[in-house]
Image (cartoon, rainbow, N blue to C red):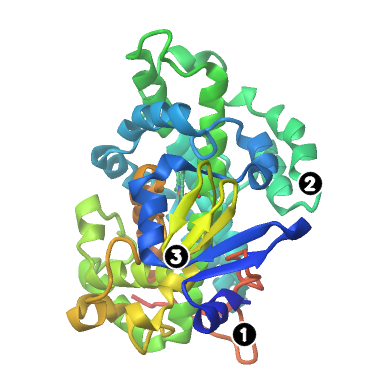
Amino acid sequence: KEPQIEWRKKYGDIIKYYEFFNQPALLISDTSIIQEITSSNTYDYIKPPNFVTDLFAFVGNGLAFSEGDIHKKQRKMMNPAFTHSNIKSMIPSFTRMASLLINLIEDKVNSGESNIALAPYISKATLDIIGLVGFNYEFNSLSSPNDLANAYSSIVSSLTPLRYMIGRLASYFPLIRKAEFDDLKGADLLSVLININKTFSIEERMTDDELKNQIMTFLLAGHETTSITTSWALYLLAQHPHVQDLLREELVKAFPDKSNFNPTFDEINSLELLNCVTKEVLRLHPPVGLIRRTNLKDKVFGNYLIPKNTQITLSILALHKSPEIWGPTAAEFDPKRWLNPELTKNVSNISYLPFNTGARGCIGNKLALNEIKVILGILVRNFVFQTIEGTHIERKSFTSAKPTSDIELTITKVES
Ligand code: HEM
């Protein structure tokens, strides 16, 4: 399911291949080209229009799919919504939702269920979280899903082409805010954004439609990515019980009373192993394993002339598993590598890119890391996760980071 790793071994860092209709395309894991595309000349590259079509219908010209000057303007306006202090204020919301997840799993374990397919529950938790911190909306998908939660999950799990479902979802969205647009004191991303918007001149301001598209963008960009990462983390920890034990030791020390897991931002970020585990999961299972672009101008990459409008795919996954960068243990889950200068000496800000980087890097980066750490922290503080013999889970496909199954694990309670 990860052919890009083999291709890189066989053909190198710049691979030319042919897509539909004999269109030449490139698969890149060369760091100097990645530097060019992500950082030096970001705006010479756009997201390929054919790839964007369906998603665009969903999020319109939200930040993830706007280009050029519109993107620059939106990014400038949206950056202040993701400041350190805003993310700090979200930690209690992460904890509140993660505690509901704990209660739900505990009920199942108490009722005698020990093998539990976790991914769907994690996905509900991250939906509830992004609803709350994104636009102060309670999906309640962990407790009693409402219409919007149902509509949303039928869209993301549906085989129906996305565009046919948009109308359905859009019809629910006016419910979210209505008259509240004017007087907003909340710390959620949308409230902050609306307040920032008001400080710009009328001509510069985002329209209500643009603002709505940003909510859809937060949902689309922030829900599955965090849930997939957290699910993979649990699977990897179940496969590596020694690491899981060490992580639990760290958590027990920091939170001796498991019923009182209420970390501050500083506390959750001071946990060294939790930090390393999170980084390592994002290395081995980046939810965005491929970044797609097309060049607006002719370009020269090394000895090659790249005509404009070439499909260019950056293989983040191949980069993250390259032995030249990570050494002979590149394919192994070893969170402690992050504390070993010998093992990270070839790693730079351009060779570890779960969030991309530069002007189009993930704006939700810190939000996501903190959310994942809180969910993972409270889960591992409360439960022991073990793999079930005979199950083997891998990435779903070359393009999707989803696991091939719902990550069923044997779960037992940590007694104190
Ligand atoms: C583990 C979780 C996440 C990962 C791995 C991730 C990864 C990424 C990556 C790789 C990109 C760049 C895509 C590209 O260049 O084609 C991106 C963009 C983006 N992400 Fe995330 N993301 C995560 C969570 C979030 C969250 C929680 C939010 C919002 C609340 C978010 C909002 C966005 C937005 C708005 C963009 C577009 C930024 C722009 O183009 O200026 N992401 N993300």
**Within 8 Å: ligand 1 and the Cβ of disc 3?**
no
Q: Position of residue 377 (x, y in %)?
A: 35, 65
Give amino acid for label 3: Asn
Q: In which quarter of the image is residue 275?
A: bottom left
Q: Which residue is drawn at 29% across and 61% down?
A: 349
Q: How far apart are marks 3 and 1 (CA)?
A: 42 Å
- Residue contact at pointers 2 and 1, CB within 8 angstroms: no
Whether residue 374 sits left or right of residue 384 in the image: it is left
Give the mark, 2 or 3, whose residue is nearer the N terminus.
Answer: 2
Q: Position of residue 340 (x, y in %)?
A: 20, 80
Query: Is disc 3 placed on a helix, strand or loop?
Result: loop
Name the residue carrying label 2. Answer: 161
**Within 8 Å: ligand 1 and the Cβ of disc 2?**
no
Whether residue 309 sits left or right of residue 95 in the image: it is right
Q: How far apart are marks 2 and 1 (CA)?
A: 30 Å
Quadrant of image for the C terminus: bottom left
Give the mark, 3 or 1, whose residue is nearer the N terminus.
Answer: 3
Query: Is disc 2 placed on a helix, strand or loop?
Result: loop
In this view, 107 is above or below 114: above
Give the mark, 2 or 1, whose residue is nearer the N terminus.
Answer: 2
Nearer the observer, 343 or 265: 343
User: Which mark lies nearer to you, 2 or 3?
Assistant: 3
User: Which mark lies nearer to you, 3 or 1?
Assistant: 3
In this view, 161 is above or below 63: below
Query: Is disc 1 placed on a helix, strand or loop?
Result: loop
User: Which mark lies nearer to you, 2 or 1?
Assistant: 2
Quadrant of image for the N terminus: bottom right
Name the residue carrying label 3. Answer: 303
Give amino acid for label 2: Pro
